[in-house]
Amino acid sequence: MQPQVFDLLVHLLRHRDHVVSRDDLIELVWGGRIVSDSTLDSRINAARNAIGDNGKEQKLIRTIPRKGLRFVGSVNGQPDGDQPAAMSPEDVNERLRPPLQLPDRPAIAVLPFDNMSGDQEQEYFSDGISEDIITALSKLRWFFVISRNSSFTYKGKAVHMKQVAAELGVRYVVEGSVRRSGDRVRITAQLNDTATGSHIWAERYDRDLVDVFAVQDEIADAIVTAIEPQIYVAENFRSRRKPPNSVDAWDLVMRALSHHWRVTRCDSTAAQVLLEKAIAIDPNYGQALALFATNHMFGVHLGWVDIATAAPVAERAALAAIAADSEDSWAHTALGSVYFSTRRLDDSLAEFELALQLNPNFSLAQGYYGLALSYSGRWQDAYVATQRAIRLSPRDPSSAIYYGVAAYSQFVGKNYSEAIALAREATRQRGDLTGAYRVLTVAAGMAGQIDVAKAALQELRRTQPNISLAWISNQLPWKLDSDREHYLEGFRRAGLD
């Protein structure tokens, strides 16, 4: 056996109680010199062959993806002089310390991303990605995010998810790697559920490094906006598996949020019932109050709820949510939606802008901001906002709404073909999306595509039976009379009276 192969095998045997990283092997066997992946792989294969193992079966030396290697075979006895060192009192106390109690909100730790470039000078880039994700997640007030100082104690160590969960008191762990080659970088990230050990989400990002810091910001934002809805879905699934007598306010909010995202009238009603139960448990629960207000005003805009009844209730809830946590972007988005539907457009824009200052990655606030800009006559700005919402969160449950708002902004700008295409995408994603059918109707009507307009109007009547020119004039909050008349004319051409 070659000396390097022998040393590698002995190291795996001595440290068989945990996963050994590839970096550790390189440090021990090659003294930290730069070694290609193929060289290391050849020595690993030689070690397997020497003890009757192979890379396919991995009965003795197992590869743990993205972690390293571990010797998993049984070992009879220990060589002299290889006895484990006695544990210090501090180590004993650490082993006996009970796991931390999980907080009421989803708790998340972001582990330092692994630098796979083989260049220690690139360490700042992988650390920067991790730090930016922690900072961005911290702006989501619905989550409990472990600080950088605690997460980075695991830097360079091969650890199990359950160990991280116990030591930091978290349910979710984000981990990843960065591999840079010349002017290209590949970043992988995944979200893990520590309770089940499963991957909830994973993605790979390939980018050109024209501006290192711009790429770092872009990737961090993309990861955070992808993670947020995945955690809500996971939390909803988890809450539904709990016994009925152990359901708390957070569980009710998660169940309500899943109904809210389905964008149907019956789901909107179901969400309100669940939120009322959550508020009854905790009258100052900001998340429940914010979603309660948002859900009410969304129903108003889609014609499901009478504004005179819904607006006062929603405004009280939104103000209470802000009183509970003035730094929560959901709360300001809720109040912005109230101001929008009650024709206080300038106040609405101010609330959405504040929500985005608090959390620039909040795609829902971007979408609503685009809607308010459209009704204020600022259709170019509105379109930019909707494109940012779509780009921020391409898997967002509300992406159909963002396409619908983008369609309306193009209609205001009299770009009818673009409006039709965007509205069709919105209805493709959500077949009952009232607002998108409205835009499809008026854009096709103004474009002279009367058959398309009439077909869209028929679908609209299915989703909003009370639609009429009078309802449109009285309920929708235009700032400019010319925009209102433009919208009404599209409906008249489609045959609405």
Image (spheres, rainbow, N blue to C red):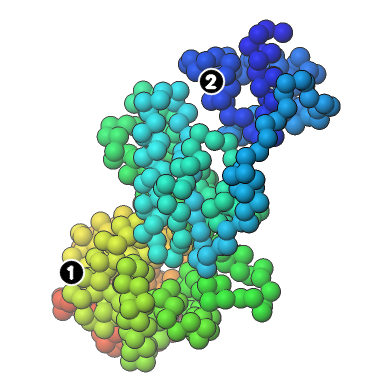
- Taking the spot 37% from the left edge, 92% from the top edge, the residue there is 309
Residue 346: image location, x then y, percent:
18, 74
Q: Which mark is residue 27?
A: 2
SS of the residue at dot 2? helix
- The outermost residue toward the top is 2
Residue 247: image location, x then y, percent:
61, 76
Image position of 8 (left or right of 405): right
* Kind of residue at disc 1: Gly
Seen in the picture, residue 4 relative to 338 is either above or below; the reply is above
Q: Earlier in the sequence, mark 1 or mark 2?
A: 2
Q: Local crowd at mark 1 within 10 Å, few (<14), some, or many (≥20)?
A: some
- Taking the spot 48% from the left edge, 42% from the top edge, the residue there is 153
* The N terminus sits in image quarter: top right
Between the residue at mark 1 and the residue at mark 2, the CA separation in whole angstroms equals 63 Å
Of discs 1 and 2, which sits in the foreground? Answer: 2
- Taking the spot 28% from the left edge, 40% from the top edge, the residue there is 214
